[in-house]
Amino acid sequence: MVALALLAGALAAAPAYAAIAQSFVPPAANPSSTSTNYVGKNNGTIHNSPKVTGKAFDRFIQIWLENTDFATAASSPTFQKLAQEGLLLDGYYGLTHPSEPNYAVAGLGDFFGMHGDSFSAFPKNTSSVVDLLDAKNISWASYQIRYSIYPLLAIPYALTAASTDSLSISAPPDYVRKHSPLILTDSVAGVPERALRHRNFNDFAVDLNASALPQWMFVTPNLVDDAHDSTIDFTSSWLEYWLVPLLQNQNFNDNRTLILLTFDEAETYTQPNQVFTLLLGGALPQQLVGQKDPSYYTHCSTLSTVQANWGLGSLGRCDTNKTLANVFEFVANATGYKNNGLTSNSTKLPMTNLTGVFPGYANTEMWTPVLAPNVSAVGAGGGSVFVYPGTNTSLTSWSPQNLTAMGVTNPISIDPGYDYSNGSLVTAAAAPSSSSSKTATGSIAAATGKSAATSFAVPAMGVLVAAAGVAALL
Ligand SMILES: *[C@@H]1O[C@H](CO)[C@@H](O)[C@H](O)[C@H]1NC(C)=O
Ligand SMILES: *[C@@H]1O[C@H](CO)[C@@H](O)[C@H](O)[C@H]1NC(C)=O
Ligand SMILES: *[C@@H]1O[C@H](CO)[C@@H](O)[C@H](O)[C@H]1NC(C)=O
Ligand SMILES: *[C@@H]1O[C@H](CO)[C@@H](O)[C@H](O)[C@H]1NC(C)=O
Ligand SMILES: *[C@@H]1O[C@H](CO)[C@@H](O)[C@H](O)[C@H]1NC(C)=O
Ligand SMILES: *[C@@H]1O[C@H](CO)[C@@H](O)[C@H](O)[C@H]1NC(C)=O
Ligand SMILES: *[C@@H]1O[C@H](CO)[C@@H](O)[C@H](O)[C@H]1NC(C)=O
Ligand SMILES: *[C@@H]1O[C@H](CO)[C@@H](O)[C@H](O)[C@H]1NC(C)=O
Ligand SMILES: *[C@@H]1O[C@H](CO)[C@@H](O)[C@H](O)[C@H]1NC(C)=O
Ligand SMILES: *[C@@H]1O[C@H](CO)[C@@H](O)[C@H](O)[C@H]1NC(C)=O
Ligand SMILES: *[C@@H]1O[C@H](CO)[C@@H](O)[C@H](O)[C@H]1NC(C)=O
Ligand SMILES: *[C@@H]1O[C@H](CO)[C@@H](O)[C@H](O)[C@H]1NC(C)=O
């Protein structure tokens, strides 16, 4: 009963604004130009450490679009044209619904039971791909587009997710914090030299011209360019304006650049969550251009592929799950990694269209602390699992608690108050202290005791064992 109710709620929360028709207006003369239409001035060229050579590529650029079924993207002439210039990943899936948990996976390797789009601040011991990149001095940045060119859309993002941690790029209406994978963890948002690697599109133009784009990049278009509040035609126009010329720009795409163009999730929740995904860029072997790769991939593959390429450590979450984290095959071939052989035609692929039913730190009704990563996991890069200093590596299971029933606020929803509007970190003194509030993790534990009588092991990736976990719980 409970699971059905949760599911029904999640279905009702499906995107409701995805088809506001507008016509695309170029925000700047070209992708390498700054513009007053971009919110936020450029703050100087980004500073990067020297290039670290990878086995199959030296730069990985991810561009994430929104909420579109495979067939819808496949019907667009722009996507058809791009598919001729790249490799169509015919077996690539989102991991859940709605949007934000999919972004969490791209940065953190798990969605921790998240099944909504609300403000989420994970504690500092929630490691991310940044910890793995920084360990090898591989430069990275997240470029987030926000324009002032479009009229404010009458959508209450400010109430749901647009954030009050006023990193200057995080305000409504058309850029939202929930579409930025790394800012979700305080190990990035609370560390100035990391938080400030979130840059606007005036910064992008400057970094591009200076040939200073970093080696790992995440690009979040705004809510109209990414098809969330528009149509596939609108998004195609944006891609024609922005991506198509950049594919010819050596400062963006040289023969060691790999580009992933994907969608966070499919629009139709009752389908398996397959999303139209292309690999582009000069690092793609010539014989693969215009072809299809049928291998089974998920957003976890974006982590395992990067780990394989640079011989990185892992997060010990879905990035090390052998079912979900196939390495893009040409990279697997170049690095000697063995994939599992699944394709989108395989029977018994995991159901990755489920929502609401997984325990974790982001699920208020099945709450657990942020559990330790699986320290014995081995990822595609072969390195060790990153463990944030002070992590309790014995904390690998927890009996889920219903914070709603307990009248306790989920700590994930508490804004840590990081403010970078002056170019440096100011922390608002807002968050209540743990001793005086029912919101702190300690109180949650204390309120219910630490009895493990009803406990079951919550594995590194909630999605993986959903069915078993829920059965045990209910
Ligand atoms: C980058 O170079 C292009 C072409 O030379 C120029 O049009 C553009 O204004 C430059 N952008 C910046 C931010 O300097
Ligand atoms: C990364 O850079 C720092 C500072 O320059 C240096 O101390 C460290 O040895 C470098 N690490 C690697 C793996 O190159
Ligand atoms: C890749 O580009 C570099 C720099 O432009 C060039 O020296 C090299 O020959 C190119 N390699 C291939 C395989 O095209
Ligand atoms: C998930 O997709 C499958 C088809 O693969 C469908 O049968 C199922 O009903 C979907 N689940 C939900 C919750 O929509
Ligand atoms: C799945 O099977 C269909 C029909 O046999 C085939 O056309 C398609 O290429 C297959 N796709 C994959 C990803 O193997
Ligand atoms: C990877 O290697 C296998 C075995 O040699 C080969 O069949 C396959 O075509 C290669 N795939 C790619 C994408 O290069
Ligand atoms: C942790 O990783 C090891 C090694 O891959 C694996 O055998 C084990 O099942 C994993 N444990 C969990 C709880 O996922
Ligand atoms: C992670 O940090 C939170 C907040 O400090 C703490 O409650 C939790 O127990 C920690 N998790 C682990 C695995 O150490
Ligand atoms: C670490 O986690 C284990 C398992 O939940 C717990 O028994 C132990 O008390 C924790 N250690 C600390 C220092 O909190
Ligand atoms: C949690 O508690 C609330 C309020 O009592 C209830 O409505 C909800 O069904 C519970 N959820 C679960 C998963 O037990
Ligand atoms: C941005 O400007 C601030 C001063 O306002 C400076 O401290 C910071 O280093 C600059 N950041 C970058 C990336 O240039
Ligand atoms: C990996 O994911 C699969 C598919 O969701 C799941 O069945 C399996 O339990 C997961 N493995 C681990 C070790 O968590």
Image (spheres, rainbow, N blue to C red):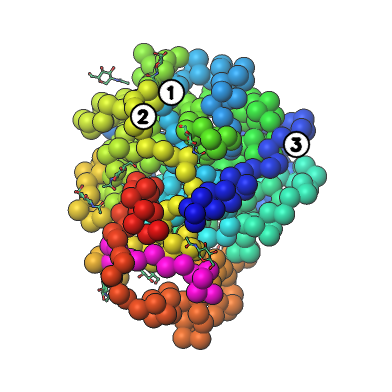
Magenta range is 395-407
Quarter of the view holding residue 329: top left
Does any portion of residue 182 appear in the rendered image?
Answer: no
* Mark 1 residue element: strand
246 to the left or right of 317: right
Tell me the crowding category of disc 3: few under 14, some 14 to 19, or many 20 or more residues within 10 angstroms, Cα based.
Answer: some
The question of residue 12 being in magenta is answered with no
Up-down relation of residue 345 to residue 303 (above or below): above
Q: What residue is shown at x 74% (from left), y 31% (from top)?
A: 24
N-term mark: 3 or 1: 3
Nearer the observer, 320 or 303: 320
Note whether ligand 5 is within 8 Å of mark 2: no
Name the mark on residue 296. 2
- The amino acid type, in three-letter code, at marker 1 is Asp
Q: What residue is shown at x 65% (from left), y 28% (from top)?
A: 232
Does any portion of residue 87 appear in the rendered image?
Answer: yes
> Is most of the magenta stretch helix, strand or loop?
loop
Up-down relation of residue 210 to residue 90 (above or below): below
Q: What residue is shown at x 78% (from left), y 49% (from top)?
A: 154
Judging by the rendered image, the residue that carries numbered circle 1 is: 90
Judging by the rendered image, the residue that carries numbered circle 3 is: 20
273 to the left or right of 75: left
Quarter of the view holding residue 445: bottom left
* Alpha-carbon span between mark 3 and mark 2: 33 Å
- The amino acid type, in three-letter code, at marker 2 is Tyr
Note whether ligand 5 is within 8 Å of mark 1: yes
- The amino acid type, in three-letter code, at marker 3 is Ile
Task: Please identify the residue farthest to the front as the structure is shown.
Answer: 1
